[in-house]
Image (tube, coloured by chain):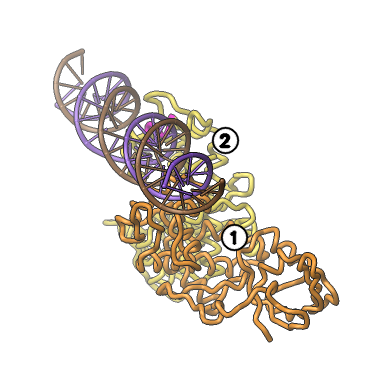
Chain colours: A orange, B yellow, C purple, D brown
Amino acid sequence: MISQTEENYLKALWNLTSSKGEASVNELSKQLDIKMPTVNSMMKRLAEKGLVHYESYKPLKLTDKGKRLAALIIRKHRLTEMYLVEKMGFGWEEVHDIAEQIEHIQSPAFFEKMDELLGFPKVDPHGSPIPDRNGKVETEQYIRYIKLSDCKEGDTVTFMAVSHSSDELLKFLNSRDLSLGSKIKVKSIEPFDESMTVSYAGRKAEMLSNKVCDKLLVRPA
Amino acid sequence: MISQTEENYLKALWNLTSSKGEASVNELSKQLDIKMPTVNSMMKRLAEKGLVHYESYKPLKLTDKGKRLAALIIRKHRLTEMYLVEKMGFGWEEVHDIAEQIEHIQSPAFFEKMDELLGFPKVDPHGSPIPDRNGKVETEQYIRYIKLSDCKEGDTVTFMAVSHSSDELLKFLNSRDLSLGSKIKVKSIEPFDESMTVSYAGRKAEMLSNKVCDKLLVRPA
DNA sequence: GTAATATGTTAGACTGATCTAACAAAATTA
DNA sequence: TAATTTTGTTAGATCAGTCTAACATATTAC
């Protein structure tokens, strides 16, 4: 059996290793806001359980078993977020903290039911892919998304996902009526700070800072 | 702050003390399947926190604060059970274990939303009252329910609640199409074992053991 | 290439939640 | 009421999960 605490380490490690495939004790420590020695000993435990590859002074990696388990926790988290938004009427900026708790519920039937009631969604309310029952993630399309900040003047794109969304960012997007699926046209880019002026359904000219554009994942038209 | 473990002690104590107003360390120990010394020291901790009246060798009682807190956990449990049955399509025999976990979720908004979506129900799927936001329980009608086993031949009653329902009992009731709200008529009582032959919607003559009748709470017609 | 800094590890302490063994008090039985 | 049984308490161990302090290894800067 795996504890809630262990699940949290796995999940954090999954997130950190998603790009490079590995992460440091230090990064994980910061991510979880738990001191390094604690993280270190937990890594040894997870290595004992066959979930993490641990060698002194080497970067951390998840084993296949660890990856699968982590993905299944992420699956529960994202299904929950989707359920909260679609079936209970929460805003996309409100659901993270609740899902953070519900993801630890032990009841396959509960999550299967959610999945079913939602019609087997492929992405969560922020556009992130929901791993399948076996912990496999459909990254095909997802990895092909580009940042809005990498677009050129005149480009027209579709807003597909938010990367590393924070409460504040989501509230900001709410306030500008910018939601997933919006067709965005880049009208101009300010050379000095790389802020963009864009137009989309309902908004003729909205200014978005580079910091915001960097978080918006889009699909070229 | 109160831990999940502490919440479980409070809840168990609330259940045990609901009739007599007090309970022994021994009873609580059996209820939770936790050894007496552990329970004992936890009672001291909860006394420190002002949730339990604890004196050596005296029966345990909840303080008003403890009662309120316990009732709020019960509220979350029962709202969850109702939600799982009404909104997610689970059977009344499936929801206890899931609710047992969800009751510990810390998110007032989550439970308020459930309550709202359910139309502010007064009872859970087993007929037990749902405490209100302030931890007050509407016992007025509930305490007036009587056991089916206390009825006489010829009585006609309405099935209102199940007391101390177990999975097996609920499955048994399912198999007999006996559900809350059913009008039950006591046709005869076997003097030897006090088993009853009753009739209700769809069933002309169904035999119910005394053990079963003892768990069915009914309202006289 | 050494010094300084950052990162990683070990050792040891603390708290929460559990246990067993031993002892004490209360309740029951004879 | 004395003996026995049940219930309650104390003491001390263990494990999970956290910390700080001290030490070790890598990395970076000069």
Q: Is residue B40 magenta?
A: yes
The subunit carrying tag 1 is A
- The front one of D23 and D19 is D23
Q: Is residue A160 visible?
A: yes
Residue A115 position, x and y percent, is 51, 74
Q: Chain of mark 2?
A: B
Q: Image quarter for residue D24?
A: top left
**Which element carries disc 1, helix, strand or loop?**
helix
Residue at image position (72%, 62%) is A171
The quarter of the picture where residue A68 lies is bottom left
Q: CA distance from mark 2 to mark 1?
A: 31 Å
Q: Label 1 is placed on what type of residue?
A: His
Residue B159 location, x and y as percent?
49, 61
Prevailing secondary structure of the magenta residues? helix
* Range of magenta residues: B39-44
Q: Nearer the viewer, residue A19 or A121?
A: A19
Q: How many marks?
A: 2
Residue B12 visible from this viewpoint: no
B21 and A103: which one is in front?
A103
Residue occupying the far bottom of the picture: A221
| Left-right relation of A203 to C29 | right
Residue for point 37% across, 56% down: A2
Q: Which residue is mark 2?
A: B65
Query: What mark, if any, has residue A96 been given in the picture?
Result: 1
* Residue drawn where x is 68% and y is 77% of the image: A159
